Amino acid sequence: MLKGLGGLSGLGDMGKMMKAAQEMQAKLAELAGRLDTITVEGSSGAGLVRATATAKGELKSLTIDPSIFRADDREVVEDLILAAIKDTQARAAERHREEMRRITDAFGLPADVKLPF
């Protein structure tokens, strides 16, 4: 009686896909929370300026060695600060990609799939 409705035989697969999507959504929500707690540190000037950020890229702290505070070196200090922040942001972005890769690998998704965050 259901012969003409051949597509219904795939409903079990659809259920599996929905379950997998829900699991992925839960993992992504868990990751979103973890990204706020994972911290990375970047530096410049052989560690004279260090910045700390979350894996989401939110800057949390900036540490500057007092030995670089001389009025005639103001531009150098500014450059070191910017370099440390950029280094930290690059490390945060890489950590974010690593965490996303773990999820895509766990679900057998291609590495370049774009997920919601």
Image (tube, rainbow, N blue to C red):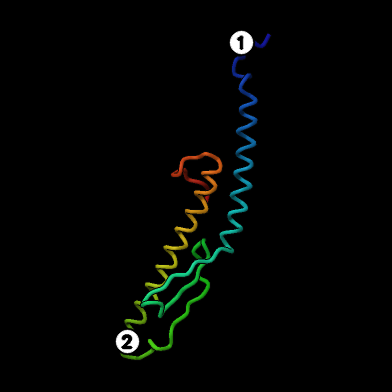
Given the image, on which type of amino acid does mark 1 rest? Gly
Q: Residue 73 carries which label?
A: 2
User: Residue at 43% across / 88% down in the picture?
Assistant: 66
Give the percent coordinates (x, y) of residue 83: 37, 72
Q: Which mark is residue 58?
A: none
The image quadrant that residue 84 belongs to is bottom left
Marks 1 and 2 close (CB-CB < 8 Å): no
Front-most of residues 78 and 16: 16
N-terminal-most mark, 1 or 2: 1
- Tell me: 12 left or right of 43: right
Give the percent coordinates (x, y) of residue 103: 55, 47
Residue ranking furthest to the right = 1
How packed mark 2 is, by other alpha carbons closer than 10 Å (few <14, some 14-19, many 20 or more), is few
**Disc 1 on helix, strand or loop?**
loop
User: Residue at 32% across / 82% down in the picture?
Assistant: 75
Give the percent coordinates (x, y) of residue 81: 40, 77
